[in-house]
Image (cartoon, rainbow, N blue to C red):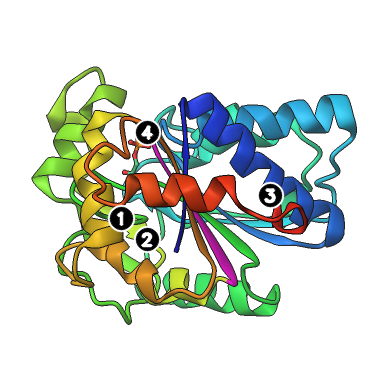
């Protein structure tokens, strides 16, 4: 795991965006795994800027989103379909036919999840997966004790996640769906690279458990310790509980030129 600590979430997001942009330039048909939530917004903002000002081309990119709430219509303003179109897709030149988001309204969850997994394989597999982390250590909506071998499936949110996400639903927990469809941890681990973003004091404990704690199903994100290419972009606040924070800063400061943005 490579830990990249930056003074602010803007700085961390701009650094992460360069990694995404480099992939898209080198491989125009790249397959991206995308995340929702507050965390990736500055990253999407920077990618939109790169598209608009530098011509970063998404026309041949395929994307797969991590998750979606069960029971919310795609057009519901808090569905992850709406989130992605609102905050990213409508500002870039991605082909709508290459956008995949789990179907939270499916009447056949098992078949729909299997189809999603097959679509990822048919697209050639995910080159780069963007991830946030829950305060309980989840990735996607793989809550604590999720199997490390899990694939796309239905899950029940923890109460902690329901409380965390109530801010998107008028601070009314009763409006937050209880179920979701999420890529599994096995699906995420199949991505050729992973980029985790986390900002603020509220993520410090989860980040420390993920990076420096034991690999355990109680902290789903800790499985990234076993990934060959996982980068963690965090701000000083999210890094505040890392024992080896100074070491990670030292490593990054000494990174050879040819490895930048790689
Ligand atoms: P957040 O969510 O970006 O809204 O904090 C992250 C997550 O739950 O994965």
For the stretch drawn in magenta, the main secondary structure is strand
Specify the quadrant of the image occupied by residue 39. top left
Residue 142 is at least partly visible in this image: no
Residue designated by label 3: 20
**Which of labels 2 and 3 is toward the front?**
3
Q: Secondary structure at mark 3?
A: helix
Residue designated by label 2: 182
- The Cα–Cα distance between marks 1 and 4, rounded to whole angstroms, is 18 Å
Instruction: Examine the rendered structure and indicate whether residue 163 appears above or below residue 32.
Output: above
Image position of 199 (left or right of 159): right
The residue that appears at 39% across and 31% down in the rendered structure is: 78
- The Cα–Cα distance between marks 1 and 2, rounded to whole angstroms, is 6 Å
Instruction: Examine the rendered structure and indicate whether residue 226 appears above or below residue 91.
Output: below
Residue designated by label 4: 199
* Crowd rating for badge 1 (residues with CA inside 10 Å; few <14, some 14–19, many 20+): many
Q: Secondary structure at mark 4?
A: loop
Specify the quadrant of the image occupied by residue 63. bottom right
* Crowd rating for badge 4 (residues with CA inside 10 Å; few <14, some 14–19, many 20+): many
Q: Are marks 1 and 2 in contact (CB under 8 Å)?
A: yes
Residue designated by label 1: 141
Specify the quadrant of the image occupied by residue 43. top right
**Residue 191: percent from left, percent from top:** 55, 71
Image position of 155 (left or right of 181): left
Write down the region rendered in magenta. 192-198
Q: Quadrant of the C terminus?
A: bottom right
The residue that appears at 17% across and 39% down in the rendered structure is: 162
**Which of labels 4 and 2 is toward the front?**
4
**Residue 159: percent from left, percent from top:** 9, 44
**Residue 30: percent from left, percent from top:** 75, 62
């Amino acid at each position: 795991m490579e830990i990249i600590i930056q003074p602010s979430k803007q700085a961390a997001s701009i650094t992460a965006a360069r990694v995404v942009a480099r992939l898209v330039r080198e491989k125009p048909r790249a397959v991206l795994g995308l995340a929702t939530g507050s965390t990736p917004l500055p990253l999407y903002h920077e990618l939109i800027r790169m598209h608009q000002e530098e011509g970063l081309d998404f026309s041949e990119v395929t994307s797969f989103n991590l998750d979606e709430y069960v029971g919310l219509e795609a057009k519901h303003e808090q569905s992850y379909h709406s989130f992605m179109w609102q905050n990213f897709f409508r500002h870039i030149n991605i082909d709508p036919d290459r956008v995949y988001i789990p179907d939270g309204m499916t009447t056949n969850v098992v078949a729909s999840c299997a189809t999603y997994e097959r679509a990822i394989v048919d697209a050639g597999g995910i080159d780069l997966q963007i991830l946030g982390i829950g305060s309980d250590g989840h990735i996607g909506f793989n809550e604590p004790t999720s199997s490390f071998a899990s694939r796309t499936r239905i899950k029940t949110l923890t109460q902690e996640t329901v409380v965390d996400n109530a801010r998107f639903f008028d601070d009314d927990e009763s409006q937050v769906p209880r179920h979701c469809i999420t890529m599994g941890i096995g699906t995420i681990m199949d991505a050729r690279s992973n980029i985790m973003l986390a900002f603020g004091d509220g993520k410090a404990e989860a980040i420390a458990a993920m990076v420096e704690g034991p690999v355990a199903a109680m902290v789903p994100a800790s499985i990234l310790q076993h990934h060959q290419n996982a980068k963690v972009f965090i701000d000083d606040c999210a890094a505040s509980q890392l024992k080896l924070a100074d070491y990670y800063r030292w490593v990054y400061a000494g990174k050879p030129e040819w490895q930048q943005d790689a």
